[in-house]
Amino acid sequence: MLEADVAIIGGGPGGYVCGIRSAQLGLRTVVIEADRLGGECLNYGCIPSKSLITVSKLVDKIKEAEKFGLRASGVSVDFIQLQKWKSEVVSKLVSGVEGLLRGYHTTVVSGVAEVVSKDRLVVATSQGNEEVLFKNLVIATGTRTSALPGLEFDGDLVISSKEGLELKGAPSRLVIVGGGAIGLEFASMFQKLGSQVTVVEIMDQLLPGSDPEVVRVVQRKLEARGAKVHLKSKVARIAKKSSEAEVEVETPEGRVVITADKVLVSVGRKPRTEKLNLAAIGVQTDPRGYVITNERMQTNVSGVYAIGDVRGPPLLAHKASKEGIVAAECIAGLPSAADWKVVPEAVFCDPEVASVGLTEAKAVEAGYKVKRSRFQFAALGRALSAGEPEGFVKVVSSEESGLVLGVQIVGPEASNLISEAALAIEMGATVDDIALTVHPHPTLPEAIMEASESAAGHPIHQLRT
């Protein structure tokens, strides 16, 4: 039997970070992982997808290089080598996580955990059952991909994002069911790698919940490259043949039939709690199965905590990591809590989308008198010199105080640019604070400064409106 101050079920970006921080604070820590350390994000999501997206962007750049005076021919993608490189990236990062946990003397157990009582769990390992006696329990089991009735995954024609990242070639015809973040990342990536892409989304816009102005830029780019986008639509039926599928889609204009080599379904995720036996100790979950906690990650059961995706949206790795730190510090007796104002989000489609804080609509809904200011990347020297003029930075602020309420970015390097905006909101910055901050030239972050100058009433590189 292992004895621990903290037992953490799940070794993803929430669990392993919680394990590291717990050990740093002098707690005897056990991390239990059913698959591979790093979780879904590192092994089957964020990292492998961004590896493939990076290559697809490079291929696209080479293909359009002629406009820069660079002529290249015979460009092709060796998917076997590409998959090998992607796997090497993942393996290096997994090894890094293993090394950190080992370096902090955290015990790692490979197997499936089941909670037996408020101080004991059993792990089914390849060598048999192992018991862990704990003082505190952290649930960090994440989520799993949701399937749709009639569109169950078969790993061949109907696939999830996990299988999509393992393909040995770009499907000639790809139907993506779900126009959220994952769906759009795959749409942009495979389109650049040569697939004819169709996106089916049940809501009235792609990236539901995002700023419509931002989403329109992404949709226009997809459609300009030949993609078909069906909004307010759903898959009515799928007929599988030997090597292709006929997908019948109900659209506002009527039913259409699309022939596809692969159908990638990305319609959401469900919490992984069903095998934990949490009911045995009375842990409360919401109607969707997410574990309910307070701002200190505590559940209704003393000594039991939950972090990351298993406690509900937004389902983001960086949020899970921060929550893991909070849980560890609370267990150690520190006055820690999830007291951040905002959590930034990024979607690695083309162009990239990133957002933090309130959108214009949400700010109005919250009762603010809103000022919105935009600066187009087409007017920015660095964006033009990089050949990436699409998109804009939008700053949402209080008209009365100038307080920055939210920032939305669609365009080059949006995922990297959003952190400045997150820091600004976290520190209570006004548009004047950003406008008065000297930004190096020529760089992409100047767009945030320019939009803020406009919000402050003295735009420089655009006319005052």
Image (cartoon, helix red, strand yellow):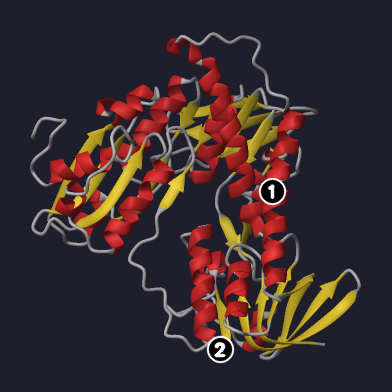
Quarter-wise, where is residue 122 in the image? bottom right
> What is the number of callouts on the image?
2
Looking at numbered disc 2 in the image, what kind of residue is underneath it?
Val
Q: Position of residue 139 (x, y in %)?
A: 61, 75
- Can residue 332 be seen from the camera position used here? yes
Is 437 situated above or below 277? above
| 3D distance between C-alphas at marks 2 and 1 | 36 Å
Looking at numbered disc 1 in the image, what kind of residue is underneath it?
Val
Q: Position of residue 169 (x, y in %)?
A: 72, 28
At mark 2, the secondary structure is loop
Left or right: 420 as drawn, with respect to 461? right
Quarter-wise, where is residue 52 in the image? top right
Of badges 2 and 1, the one in the foreground is: 1
Residue at 56% of width from left, 26% of height from top?
A: 58
- Which is more N-terminal, label 1 or label 2? 1
Left or right: 82 as drawn, with respect to 432? right
Left or right: 82 as drawn, with respect to 331? right
Residue at 83% of width from left, 74% of height from top?
A: 124
- Can residue 286 be seen from the camera position used here? no
Taking depth in this image into account, of 370 and 275 the one nearest to the observer is 370
Taking depth in this image into account, of 23 and 123 the one nearest to the observer is 23
Tags 2 and 1 touching, CB below 8 Å: no
The residue carrying mark 1 is 90
Judge the density around disc 1: few (<14), some (14-19), many (≥20) Cα neighbours within 10 Å. Answer: some
The residue carrying mark 2 is 301
In which quadrant will I find the N terminus?
A: bottom right
Q: Position of residue 232 (x, y in %)?
A: 43, 39
Is 120 situated above or below 240? below
